[in-house]
Image (cartoon, grey):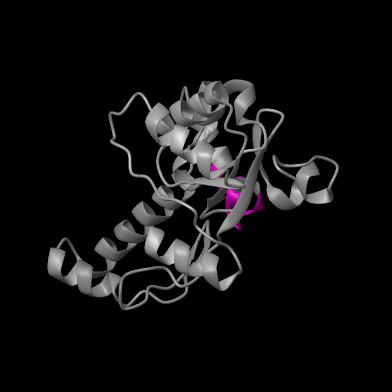
Amino acid sequence: MFKYFNQFLSENGGVMVGSFGVGADQQDFSAELTKVKELNPEIIFFGGLTPIGIRVLKQMEKLGVTAQFQGTSGIVGEAFINGAGALAEGTVAMYDNPPVEKLPGGKFFIEKYAQQKYSEPPEAYGPYAYSAATLVMDTIEKVGPNRKKINEELGKVKNYDSIVGKITFDDYGQNINPTTTKYVVQDGKWLDWNDSEYSSGKRKLKGR
């Protein structure tokens, strides 16, 4: 991921001043963050999941690292906000889905999810998981419970209607109709960047 991240960053006038790997069970990031503080970056791009993201953000605060914190879809969800508290404010992340209510079948998904009375709200990839399960079940109905035929049929998917929009797979099994959206935490909620006060300029990200 970082290979392409650095490539895109360079092509757009940015410079990666440092890169650090951490362990999945690592608790203390003081060594890495002390080096980060010396490098004085504008942005810390975190390519991981919520538990580590929360720990990194809290230790950034403790060590006085004031860089803007940015992540991937791995931190988009209520768990990150609940765990990071006020420190989550202004965190930016890219996520492969616009807000559920903006999806073609968003209203349908929200209503059906609510009917199940789950104790937790749907997380980042809930609509995609639903769409994937629906696609697989439709495929099984079409070709029968034969793994080989199912795989072959899924490889031919073109313009499949789903709650997340049209689905078409390329030769690598990736949907060629991405819906990547920029999000930011504002007042304890993940918002579409375009709907936020950060986008309008009313609020400023760190370092701006």
Residue 33 percent across, percent down from the top left: 46, 34
**Residue at the spot 46% in from the left edge and 63% down from the top edge:** 6
Q: In the rendered view, would you say 152 is above or below 190?
A: below
Q: Nearer the viewer, residue 122 or 53?
A: 53
Q: Is residue 135 visible?
A: yes
Q: Quadrant of the C terminus?
A: top right
Residue 196 lies, with reference to residue 87, above or below; the image says below
The answer to whether 81 is drawn above or below residue 44 in the figure is above
Q: Is residue 121 left or right of residue 21?
A: right
Residue 24 position, x and y percent, is: 29, 34
Q: Please state which of residues 79 and 62 is positioned toward the viewer in this rendering.
A: 62
Question: Which image quarter is the N terminus in?
Answer: bottom left
Residue 147 to residue 121: above or below: below
Q: Is residue 34 magenta?
A: no
Q: Closest to the observer: 19 or 153?
A: 19
Q: Which of the pair 170/60 is nearer the observer?
A: 60
Q: Residue at x 45, y 73 (%)?
A: 176
Magenta-tinted stretch: 102-109
